[in-house]
Amino acid sequence: MKDNPKNSLCIDGNRFIPIQMIDVAGLVPDAWKGRGLGNRFLDELRKASVLIHVVDASGGTDEEGRIVPPGTHDPCRDVEFLEKEIVMWIKQILIADWQRIVKRRESSIEEILTEKLSGLQISKRDIEKTLEKTDLKSKRLELWNDEDITRFCYEIRRENKPIVIAANKIDVPTAEDGFKKLKERYGGSSIIIPCSAEAELVLRKAAEKGFIRYLPGDDKFEIINESKLTSEQRKALKIIEERVLMKWKGTGIQEIINTAILDVLKMIVVYPVEDVNKLSDHHGNVLPDALLIRESSTARELAYMIHQELGDTFLYAIDVRTKHKIGEDAPLKMNDIIKIVATKARK
């Protein structure tokens, strides 16, 4: 049975599900103070669930974005200053009108901080977990000193705006040393993935033109129309094969996306259908939608994702593979195929 996706793409049996990504403006030191395009950059982070920090692992670009000789800039400085900028941005939002909010007696610490940081899409659960990790839960807000506030902001960033580091330009000779530095410095606390955006772009363009067969995420490609390749193009593909695919097991681009969505955010993919036998919607499209949902999301929550009315009138769900009924609070699993059964809405 061949699927007929509506909201995604299927290539050679592999389902590629779209996600929303924002390519934010470049950040420079002291952006939180408004330097450069800092305010615009930081404002675009408000709704982000995970951040992918693209770092020039070759050391050929400094923190101001200027081109420098490869190997002369330490990529660890880029990671350090980005986190500081984000933390200071959060801190400025938190301490605005600080003396007034710390005197509030009618609300708990969790409620006060959640209200203060809600514009950053920070939830009460994020606040509670951060207070536990920083041992600040039992300390009254009016007793928090500057060190306490800064420590809280560092931890809330890790909890609510996790960062995956993309060690880019890994095909440049000096990048391997830069990658090692990043691993030694941040390998224990951050996910660092070697990648080559340029190699991925070349491979995708070659595949679009029918020169090669390449699937994003693969560690190899197949030339299918060599006669149309120029000697320069063949040489470029050979370099990518040797310096990137064979050495690093892929360009890293698809791995970064998969890691950010599936591992860091812990999301799973489910396939809602209407016909349990044909695995289709009412138009006959087989496995039409692939939805990314939070791990441990329930069947009713899936129903609400599909349509408000479907969630309101939810009766039960069916695991299409087992044909078993699933209650509203049953957590769903990766690659579940689900049919939602609901009552008819009153009119």
Image (spheres, rainbow, N blue to C red):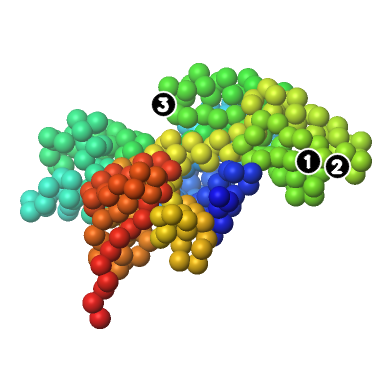
Q: Which residue is drawn at 55% across and 53% down?
A: 3
Dot 3, crowdedness within 10 Å: few (<14), some or many (≥20)? few
Percent from the top left, x then y, of residue 324? 30, 47
Specify the amino acid type for callout 2. Answer: Asn
Of the residues under marks 2 and 1, which one precedes in the sequence?
1
Is residue 20 at least partly visible in the picture? no
Left or right? Give the position of 261 relative to 149: right
Q: Do the residues labelled 2 and 1 touch (CB within 8 Å)?
A: yes
Dot 2, crowdedness within 10 Å: few (<14), some or many (≥20)? few
Specify the amino acid type for callout 3. Answer: Ser
**Badge number at residue 212:** 1
Front residue of 175 and 201? 201
The answer for how far apart the CA atoms under marks 2 and 3 are is 45 Å
Of the residues under marks 1 and 3, which one precedes in the sequence?
3
Dot 1, crowdedness within 10 Å: few (<14), some or many (≥20)? many
Q: Which residue is drawn at 21% across and 40% down?
A: 128
Front residue of 86 and 130? 130
Residue furthest toward the front? 277
Q: Which residue is drawn at 27% across and 49% down?
A: 326
Q: Label 2's element?
A: loop
Percent from the top left, x then y, of residue 44? 46, 54
Is residue 148 at least partly visible in the picture? yes
Percent from the top left, x then y, of residue 165? 52, 34
Q: Name the residue under label 2.
A: 225
Task: Please determine whether, in this image, residue 254 is positioned above or below residue 92.
Answer: above
**Badge number at residue 248:** none
Task: Please determine whether, in this image, residue 40 is positioned above or below residue 172.
Answer: below
- Depth-wise, is mark 1 or mark 3 nearer the camera? 1
